């Protein structure tokens, strides 16, 4: 039986735990610094699994030693940006938390794969890569399924087709400069660019970029169910070794002409982690949009570089 650790037992961590447990992917250990919280959530989730007849062990702990032997660790620990915080405040605070968590993963779960969920996502993936010292194939960031899922939600409504019939890639930063690729997004092979006018596509892309903020402004705190669903899908691809092609934030080593930055690209996921990067054939304008997005992340990455060594 696989052992999956979830670090950070807040809204995103718990939603991820629910959806991983429902898939029956393996035993779960929840870790948080708040006394009682991971233990209480684990007990509640164990009761949930019992009602559903799912036989996975779910435990909670404040001790990172309980990550020992984990095959996969999903990191959702961090603070959520408050109105009075700048992006830089968030970056600094979460870089310190993720550094600390990464040290513990290296110490107690040195053979595991890591899925980073904490924001700002791409830079936190970089921090985890540096601080665990793991090879890049075992450290990946979750966000692409979330952003594409939000786009797909809008496109499916617009076209009146099933969400599952819409397939497409997303690349670049998990943030305002994310790159959706309407030319390569298709309904069973027919590109979006021939199904909708370009102005309408741009509106849907813009709405997708703002979707996270839209959720916050309505419910008062940030999304958790959609991130949980996406993180659980990535966990499934790894634990069941499915070779699913998933957009993940990954440290690039020359792919797409980019060196030394963590950004979202499509990758084949399986038991070993990232098995292969898929290099899409981009047009000049798609490529330059991607490279602009890479530069946004590169700058933020440089800003944390001195903090994490
Ligand atoms: N180790 C373990 N847990 C920690 C640590 C740490 N060093 N530091 C903070 N935590 C825990 C907090 O105690 C809290 O329970 O992380 C949890 C964060 O939960 P929430 O505040 O509910 O935040 P959430 O909405 O879950 O978002 C977490 O995921 O999607 C991203 O942008 C989001 O970066 C944010 C992260």
Image: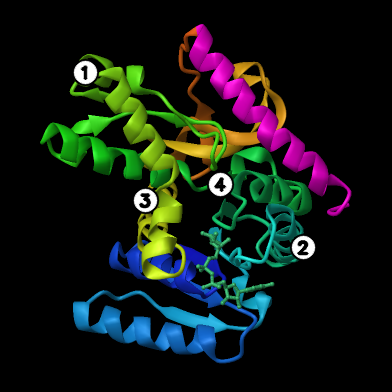
Dot 4 or dot 2: first in sequence order is 2
Task: Name the mark nearer the viewer: 4 or 2.
Answer: 2
| Gap in angstroms between the C-alphas marked 3 and 4 | 13 Å
| Gap in angstroms between the C-alphas marked 1 and 4 | 28 Å
- Magenta stretch encompasses residue 301: yes
Location of residue 73 in the rendering, given as x and y in whole percent from the top left corner? 56, 61
Residue at the disc numbered 2:
96
Location of residue 267 in the rendering, given as x and y in whole percent from the top left corner? 48, 32
Residue 181 showing in the rendered view:
yes
Q: Is residue 33 above or below residue 133?
A: below
Residue at the disc numbered 3:
233
Is the CB–ligand 1 distance for label 1 below 8 Å?
A: no
Residue at the disc numbered 4:
141
Dot 2 or dot 1: first in sequence order is 2
Is the CB–ligand 1 distance for label 2 below 8 Å?
A: no
- Magenta stretch encompasses residue 305: yes
Is the CB–ligand 1 distance for label 4 below 8 Å?
A: no
Q: Is residue 266 above or below residue 232?
A: above
* Residues in magenta, as a range: 284-309
Q: Is residue 159 toward the left or the right of residue 150 in the image?
A: left
Q: Is residue 284 above or below residue 43?
A: above
Name the magenta segment's main secondary structure.
Answer: helix
Q: Report helix, strand or loop for mark 4.
A: strand
Q: Is residue 67 toward the left or the right of residue 213 in the image?
A: right
Q: What residue is drawn where x is 39% and y is 59%? A: 215
């Amino acid at each position: 039986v696989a052992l999956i650790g979830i670090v950070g037992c807040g809204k995103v961590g718990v939603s991820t735990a629910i959806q991983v447990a429902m898939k029956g992917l393996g035993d779960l250990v929840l870790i948080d610094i708040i006394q009682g919280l991971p233990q209480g959530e684990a007990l509640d989730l164990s009761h949930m699994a019992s009602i559903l007849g799912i036989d996975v062990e779910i435990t909670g702990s404040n001790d990172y030693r309980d990550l020992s032997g984990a095959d996969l660790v999903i990191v959702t620990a961090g603070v959520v940006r408050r109105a009075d915080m700048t992006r830089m405040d968030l970056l600094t605070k979460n870089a310190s938390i993720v550094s600390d968590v990464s040290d513990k993963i290296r110490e107690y779960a040195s053979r595991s794969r890591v899925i980073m969920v904490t924001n700002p996502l791409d830079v936190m993936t970089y921090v985890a890569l540096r601080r665990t010292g793991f090879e890049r194939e075992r450290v990946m960031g979750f966000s692409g399924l979330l952003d594409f899922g939000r786009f797909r939600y809008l496109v499916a409504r617009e076209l009146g087709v099933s969400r599952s019939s819409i397939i497409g890639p997303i690349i670049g930063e998990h943030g305002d400069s994310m790159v959706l690729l309407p030319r390569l997004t298709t309904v069973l092979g027919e590109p979006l660019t021939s199904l909708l006018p370009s102005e309408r596509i741009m509106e849907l892309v813009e709405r997708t970029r703002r979707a996270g903020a839209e959720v916050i402004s309505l419910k008062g705190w940030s999304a958790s169910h959609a991130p949980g669903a996406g993180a659980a899908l990535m966990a499934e691809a790894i634990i069941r070794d499915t070779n699913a092609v998933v957009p993940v934030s990954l440290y690039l080593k020359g792919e797409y002409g980019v060196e030394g930055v963590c950004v979202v690209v499509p990758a084949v996921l399986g038991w070993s982690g990232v098995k292969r990067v898929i290099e899409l054939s981009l047009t000049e304008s798609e490529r330059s949009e991607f490279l602009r997005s890479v530069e946004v992340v590169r700058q933020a990455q440089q800003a944390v570089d001195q903090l994490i060594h």
